[in-house]
Amino acid sequence: MPINDLLANLPLTVEGYSLERLEQSVATGFTRATTTVVMHGDGHEGRGEDVTYTAEDHNGFPDSLPLAGSDSLAELSQRLESRDLFAAPPAQEAAARDYRRWAFESAALDLALRQSGQSLAQALGREVRPVRFVASTRAAIEGWVASDPTLQFKLDPTSPGTTS
């Protein structure tokens, strides 16, 4: 059964949401921005992150969508379908529209799971297994390795034909 079908009917009560924007200068002339949607209802909160790469695409984040109510995860997703989440300014990156929508939908999923007292694995009928995390950086890794020698890294090429 598709994952969406397993999650679509999760009951969900949304009382409102807030936004948390963070920015960090990571390179000369480049600021990494991220916005987290924090949805709350029935004494719980769910969080979803917009991972859009371009900092400017985090501007104009809608802060007053009419999302309050009790329904299912699928019904909330359907209500988002008719909303322009980039009313002003328009997204610079095409993928930003999907990231923005998923910030709201993942916050709703997190909230629905917490309200139902289930983990994602339980809702999907799957066994919990370890997750492997790696760091992704173009910066020198020596400081990271000195801090934690067990870290693993993803290679980010800096120019064609290089792997460091």
Image (cartoon, grey):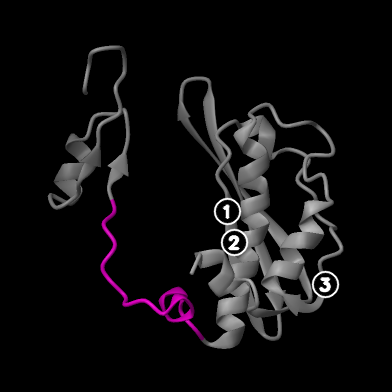
Count of numbered circles on the image: 3
The percent position of residue 58, horizontal first and vertical second, equals: 68, 39
- First to last magenta residue range: 118-133
Question: Which residue was labeled with disc 1?
Answer: 49
Whether 88 is drawn above or below 17: the answer is above
The percent position of residue 123, horizontal first and vertical second, equals: 49, 79
Residue at the location (41% across, 80% down)? 125
The percent position of residue 56, horizontal first and vertical second, equals: 67, 31
Q: Is residue 36 visible?
A: no
> Mark 1: which secondary structure?
strand
Question: Which residue was labeled with disc 2?
Answer: 106
- Amino acid identity at mark 3: Ala
Rounded to the nearest angstrom, the CA distance separating label 1 from label 2 is 8 Å
Q: Is residue 127 magenta?
A: yes
124 vs 71, left or right, is left
Are the residues at dot 1 and dot 2 in contact (C-beta closer than 8 Å)?
Answer: yes
Q: Nearer the viewer, mark 1 or mark 2?
A: 2
Question: Which residue was labeled with disc 3?
Answer: 68
- Amino acid identity at mark 1: Glu
Q: Earlier in the sequence, mark 2 or mark 3?
A: 3
- Principal secondary structure, stretch drawn in magenta: loop
Residue at the location (78% across, 56% down)? 80
Which of the two residues, 81 or 161, is positioned nearer the viewer here?
81
Residue at the location (53% across, 87% down)? 117
Rounded to the nearest angstrom, the CA distance separating label 2 from label 3 is 16 Å
118 vs 162, left or right, is right
Name the image quarter holding the C terminus.
top left
Whether 100 is drawn above or below 1: the answer is above
Which of the two residues, 67 or 26, is positioned nearer the viewer here?
67
